[in-house]
Image: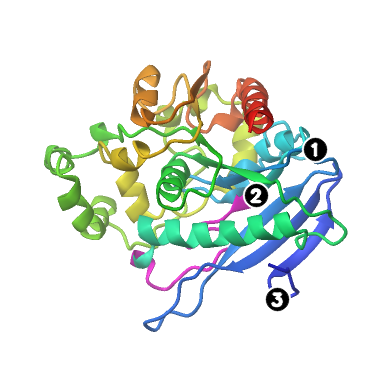
Amino acid sequence: MAMTAANASSCAVAANDDRVVNLRLDAGVAGDGVPALQSAVEIRVPMNIVRPAIALVCLPGGGMNRRFFDLVDGDDTSFSFARAMTARGFIVVMIDHLGIGASDHPADAEMLTPDLLVSANAKVVAQVLDSLRDGSLVAGEPALPELQSIGVGHSMGAMLTVLQQAQYQQHAALGVLGFSTRGLPEYLSPELRELARDRVAVRAQLVELARAMFARPPASTPRSATQGGDFFASGKADPRGVKALRPAVDKILPIPAFLSMLPGNIADASAQIRVPVFLGLGELDIVGPTHEVPAAFGNSHDVTLHIMPQAGHSHFIFAARSGLFQRFAQWARLLANDS
């Protein structure tokens, strides 16, 4: 897929010598009076790509946009997952879900179901990976026919990454951050917890249940970066990190967010994953007992669990982020070298 002026909005060299490419790509969503929608993508290509090349495809969680993976406070880039990874030779691809950030926001936000977002993200990812493999993404950049991708998602974005892998098998491995199939049952009514036992029934009513749960128009409203208090263990976060998080705060997409809260939310899809899985969880995360989380990926032949000490849900703003960055990069590089 050759990149053209129509779908590449900018290409620049960042201060750390990453080539930064911003794109708007066809998300494959149109028809029935809905205009063709585009997703916003930012790609950071390091000056020195370590071979065999790996692209980390990053999807943000609920209430966040793609900036979550590139948190910066002035000259302090230590909170940025993206820059920590490009410094180690990985290509980083950050995607705004439809309805979030710089991607198109459809008038009918109720169309943004998990199934639609998975389909849209899969189409966008395929275009990006094709352009990296054939060398058409950045002028003068060599083709990377051996390129593999690792799907990296945080929270709701991890849920969508797992669903995407179960359906499309695009990635060689998955990085699942801050997510478990346990959901958040303590924030649901007894009636909803009971209904969640019947996954077919709850999926059939997902839109109506999400609408009732959030009790707001589906477009929702932006929330504070510090909303949640102890819920996100924000009191233990680096204040500079909390500040860096603010530009990443965005709308909540009620329907996928609601699914992520249900007990057993995507247990069936998680059980279909057969590629290696890296589980990154905070000690103070909202995923339930951390050592129970790997069981959801029982058909993967390689599950790595990394627990960040004294870290809450927004992993990158806690002191333990450096350990996470180092461990994840070691895991990803070993994966590539073993392939």
Q: Nearer the viewer, residue 157 or 106?
A: 157
Mark closer to the chain start, 2 or 3: 3
Secondary structure at badge 1 equals: loop
Find residue 83 and report its image quarter: top right
Q: Is residue 18 above or below residue 263?
A: below
Mark 2 belongs to which amino acid? Val
Q: Quadrant of residue 109?
A: bottom left
Q: Residue at x 31, y 47 (%)?
A: 259
- Taking 339 as reference, is 15 left or right? right
Q: List x then y, in percent, for residue 290.
A: 40, 20
- Quadrant that contains the N terminus: bottom right
Res 93 label: 2
- Mark in front: 1 vs 3: 3
Q: Which disc, if any, is residue 6?
A: 3
- Label 1 and label 2: CA atoms lie apart by 22 Å
Three-letter amino acid code at disc 1? Asp
Whole-number angstrom distance, CA of label 2 to CA of label 3: 19 Å
Q: Which residue type does callout 3 highlight?
A: Ala
Q: Are marks 2 and 3 in contact (CB under 8 Å)?
A: no
Q: What residue lies at 72% left-to-right and 68% top-to-bottom?
A: 8
Q: CA distance from mark 1 to mark 3?
A: 32 Å
